[in-house]
Image (cartoon, rainbow, N blue to C red):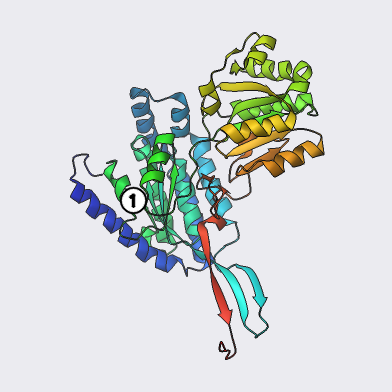
Amino acid sequence: MLEQSASRGDIAELMAALGRNARQASARLATAPTAAKDSALDAMADAILAGRNNILAANVIDMKNAEEADMAPSFRDRLKLDADRVKAMADGIRAIRDLKDPVGDVIAEWSRPNGLKIERVRTPLGVIGVIYESRPNVTADAGALCLKAGNSVILRGGSDSINSSTAIHDCLVEGLKKAGLPEHAIQIVPTTDRAAVGEMLKGLDGAIDVIVPRGGRSLVERVQSEARVPVFAHLEGLCHLYVDKSADIDMAVKIAVNSKLRRTGICGAAETLLVDRDAADTHLAPVLTALAEAGCEIRGSDEVCARFDKAKPVTEADWSTEYLDAIISVALVDGVGGAIDHIARWSSNHTEAVIAEDPAVVERFFNEIDSAILLHNASTQFADGGEFGMGAEIGIATGKMHARGPVGVEQLTSFKYRVRGSGQTRP
């Protein structure tokens, strides 16, 4: 690893070399056969399992550093690895292996009256830059997803996870070598100097085609403001759960507790609960009681506080806060219309869920809310590429580009047109 005192010129040259290597590797990956990519993914999964002790030992160092730095519990939860999480990384890589190879897939085809036959075909994006914090598993997920989609990737993990991420990366490189693919297909930035991020955001002399940030608001804001290449990202996960008067009460209780508390530190965790005012007498108390008994702090509007004595008064700032903790904001709203209005004002367009049995309510919720992921009668914590059957995800995107919601192998491709003729000329 480079020392923190390395000069800016040294960092720039290091990063430029990573970019050149990635571009060369991407040219080979673009035409790599599916069998070779799948063989590499298998070998990566094997290497992660075989190297479990090394990975966990590296993670112990990162966790010790995180505790000494007094990092928030939600960040330490993302950082922590154990035997089950290491196995889950290997399983995730094999799930990606089993996905259909998107490269070369014919998305659409048609013929013109003049006899031209046109195809729209998936192609790799090229070189992906991934900048992330705390989550060492992103090293495996991002490396595997990019490889399956025929892209090379430059990974820049945070200083808090550098030891864990490096140990995982060693396993990925081992898999590439065993399959005869270029080891520079998956590279990790070997320094924690923040100047390396700045170089990536400049695009590394045109080497990087897309940047994907995964981390806190400050990281994503920096990437979105400074990047000179396209960005797939979400700023934060201000996810809402709306309980309609038609909702099954037992279902609403179960989903609310899971949406908020299964893992509070992920972007799919619910941060705001909206309850139909017409269901205040029947649905509000059971849901809030279950949340409170499970250890969740309730911050409620005046109406909510008047009905539930364990609630603390909510502030306007709460509606725009991604807690990533066992805290939830609660309000009563005038039916699905009131829920839609509240979400339109405060949502980050990540994930929203409706609990209802009335199909008209569900259709209005789905039609009028423009968030990347909408769920009916299901936990917001399903906002995850693995749960969508994508094997894994490189992140969640809330923009309006072609990659929206979980970014999996298909979203890591572009397309080109193949036009076949028989001598046609244009008059």
Image point 81% across, 34% down: which residue?
357
Q: Is residue 190 left or right of residue 117?
A: left
**Residue in front for this viewpoint, 3 or 311:** 311
Q: Is residue 375 above or below residue 10?
A: above
**Label 1 SS:** helix
**Residue in front for this viewpoint, 177 or 369:** 369
Q: Is residue 186 left or right of residue 426?
A: left
Q: State the image coordinates of residue 183 (x, y, percent, origin top left).
A: 37, 59
Q: State the image coordinates of residue 254 (x, y, percent, origin top left).
A: 71, 26
**Residue 242's image quarter?**
top right
Image point 36% across, 34% down: which residue?
160
**Residue in front for this viewpoint, 162 or 168:** 162
Q: How many marks?
A: 1
**Quadrant placement of the N terminus:** top left
Image point 23% across, 44% down: which residue?
2
Q: Which residue is mark 1?
A: 200
Q: Amino acid at mark 1?
A: Met
* Residue at the outermost top position: 309
Q: State the image coordinates of residue 133 (x, y, percent, origin top left).
A: 41, 38
- Examine the rendering and report whether any part of residue 375 can be seen: yes
